[in-house]
Image: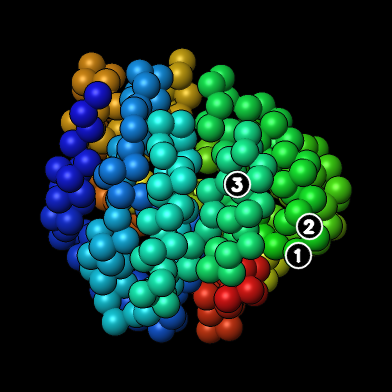
Amino acid sequence: MRIPTDSYAEYALELLPAERELIDEFSGWLPDMVVDCHVHSNPPSSVMEIDDEMYRNMVTTFPHFTIEQHRRFTELLYPGKTVVLLPFTMPYRGIDFRAANKYLLDVAGSDPTVRPVLYGLPDDTAYTIGMLSNPAFVGLKMYMLYFRPAASRISEFFTDEILAHVNQIGGTAILHPPAPVTRSFQDIAETAVRFPNVTFVVAHMGSLTLSSEGVEAVYKKLAPITNLVFDTAIVPSVEILRTGLDVFGHHRVLFGTDQPLSLVRASVCINPVLGERLATPYPYHWADPEEERGYAPYAQGATHLHWGTMKALREAIATYGETPGVVQDIFCNNARRAFKL
């Protein structure tokens, strides 16, 4: 199935007036160096096949995205800043992960601002552990959508043998829970306690939802487990980000974007039957035209998803207690510590 990724990228580059204003507004607030600990990159040649189920998921908006494309956007979104990327390949089935890992290694060899994260293969322990011996990789990412059907427990994709090795070397693992944190917190806690020398970066603050119901209670249960930190990738909820800062403190929250998915233009809205949905003014391949017609009012003026996270994070930091040091830690220093940069 053909996905017009290049057209989507060009559409994202055509900045709206509101987006230009936001770029100017945030430029004065962000530190001089920004470390983005959650981005995806792999070349077009690494995409083998996107099955029908994945095709209908918005995560396939950009099945490939090169470092060169990332640079176009980082220069646009963060003018005058040094942006360090910690990329890993698109994580779902249908990608040639070995080729994508090699691509990132090759790029990193000539670009010190690219610090790749290995995408590990849960069914090839020898490959994964062998690749982790390369010091260019600063962390490990594994994902439930490697399998079909998707894994439902962390141990199904982050296998014990692989995590035991990461624990032995004191490494870092990016953990996307197989369910929102309110349902997966016990699985997260047990995994982190069993492997105490692994720094687990819990993606998306453990949740991709706007709802903060129940989040504070489970955050408080996870707070004593100090090898858990959390990234902000595509988290548009002020409440979740504020709660995370209040419970974990600003040293355990890391800036991440999920770029290029953060370049999708859409607004989150609530369907009374289907729950949270994305309303978009653009005909992405995963957007149902009939459904989108009903969401048209929500889609008006939609900006990159990136800006929902940025605005929510700035508001959460202001409530938490903004200082230049807090902003510097969240956008730069915490990732440098967690990934030993």
**Residue wearing tag 2:** 167
Residue 221: image x %, image y %? Answer: 82, 48
- Nearer the camera: disc 1 or disc 3: 3
Q: Residue type at mark 2?
A: Asn
Residue shown at 40% from the left, 31% from the top: 94
Residue shown at 66% from the left, 45% from the top: 126
Of the 4 image quadrants, the one containing the C terminus is bottom right
Pointers 1 and 2 in contact (CB under 8 A)?
Answer: yes
The alpha-carbon separation of the residues under discs 1 and 3 comes to 19 Å
Q: Decide: is 262 above or below 55.
A: below
Q: Residues within 10 Å of mark 3 (few under 14, many from 20)?
A: few
12 sits left or right of 201 in the view = left
Q: Residue type at mark 3?
A: Tyr
Residue 250: image x %, image y %? Answer: 65, 69
Element type where label 2 sits in the image: helix
The alpha-carbon separation of the residues under discs 3 and 2 comes to 17 Å
Task: Specify the label residue 127 is tagged with.
Answer: 3
Task: Specify the label residue 170 is tagged with.
Answer: 1
Residue shown at 40% from the left, 19% from the top: 53
Element type where label 1 sits in the image: loop
Element type where label 3 sits in the image: helix
